[in-house]
Image (tube, grey):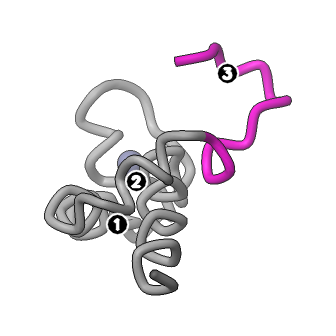
Amino acid sequence: MAGSDGAYTPGDGPMAGVLADMPEVFGRLLDQHVPDRLGRCTACRNAGSGVVWPCTLHQIATRASALHASR
Ligand SMILES: [Zn+2]
């Protein structure tokens, strides 16, 4: 994975295309990566400091879901 320098948009990257064929995977991501009352991702928060939702993984999963639905 590339670093997070801001120029890379996760939802448009290759990960979404890969996950589009794995509905059980992006479905789990969409279930787990939800905002808390402060608008921060509950799943990513467990891995470190607060991440503003939608987080990278949720953006990818959302894109994957859209790709999957369009197939
Ligand atoms: Zn997250």
Viewer-closest of 5 and 8: 8
The quadrant in which residue 64 appears is bottom left
Q: Quadrant of the C terminus?
A: bottom left
| Residue ID for mark 3 | 4
Q: Is mark 2 within 8 Å of ligand 1?
A: yes
Viewer-closest of 43 and 13: 13
Residue bounds of the magenta highlight? 1-13
**Kind of residue at badge 2:** Cys
Viewer-closest of 55 and 24: 24
Q: Which residue is at a point 48% across and 68% down the rendered structure image?
A: 62
Q: Which residue is at a point 38% across and 62% down the rendered structure image?
A: 20
Residue 15, image x and y in percent?
A: 48, 41
Q: Is residue 25 above or below residue 31?
A: above
* Residue 41 numbered tag: 2
Which mark is nearer the camera, 3 or 1? 3
Residue 37, image x and y in percent?
A: 40, 70
| Residues at marks 1 and 2 touching, judged by CB atoms closer than 8 Å | yes
* Residue 34 numbered tag: 1
